[in-house]
Amino acid sequence: MNKGKEHTLGRYKESYVFLRNYLLKLPTRSLPFTRIDKLGIPKTLWSLRPLIKGSREEQRVALSIARGYEQIRLEIDYTDLAAITDEHTPQEERAVLDLTKKFNKFLKQFTRNRK
């Protein structure tokens, strides 16, 4: 069943987080979308088992491979920019101006003049 690229990348990220915690001997939770082997390693990481069971350097390689999902870039959805581009109410504009004044006061008080 195809649930989309975002869903798939989320699964890869969950697999990486599992592996990271597993190798650091931190508490892990099983991944609900896949089977596990007798060591508790999810099926999505089975191809990395020799590295996971190997030396510290091999485990680092396994982590690097599992972290490869970060290199995949998805297209940005520009369909809903209303929250950014809509006009603000007068109250919101006053709040921003008031915050700007307070921040400038803070900067003057807690920063030094550079010569």
Image (cartoon, helix red, strand yellow):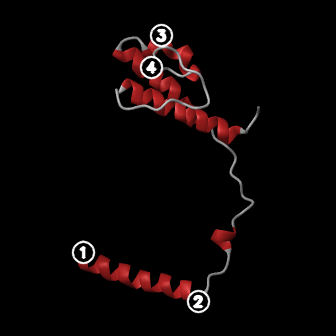
> Dot 1, how many residues are within 10 Å of its Cα: few (below 14), some (14-19), or many (20+)?
few
| CA–CA distance in space, label 3 to label 1 | 55 Å
Residue 107: % across, % down? 31, 76
Q: Sequence order check: which comes first, mark 3 or mark 2?
A: 3
Q: Is residue 8 visible?
A: yes
Residue annotated with mark 4? 61
- Judge whether 38 appears above or below 28 on screen: above
Residue type marked 4: Val
Kind of element beneath mark 2:
helix
Residue occupied by mark 3: 50
Q: Which mark is residue 49?
A: none
According to the image, label 2 marks what residue?
Answer: 90
Q: CA distance from mark 3 to mark 4?
A: 11 Å
Counting residues from the start of the chain, the first of labels 3 and 1 encountered is 3
Label 4 close to label 1 by CB (< 8 Å): no
Q: Residue at x 38, y 24 (%)?
A: 23
* Residue type at the position of mark 3: Pro
Q: Which residue is mark 1?
A: 110
Q: Between label 1 and label 2, give the one nearer the viewer.
A: 2
Number of disc labels = 4
Image quarter hosting the N terminus: top right
Q: Upstream in the sequence, badge 4 or badge 1? A: 4
**Residue 113, visible in the rendered structure:** no
Q: Amino acid at mark 2?
A: Pro
Q: Is residue 115 left or right of residue 44?
A: left
Asked if labels 2 and 3 touch by Cβ distance under 8 angstroms, the answer is no
Amino acid bearing label 1: Phe
SS at circle 4: helix
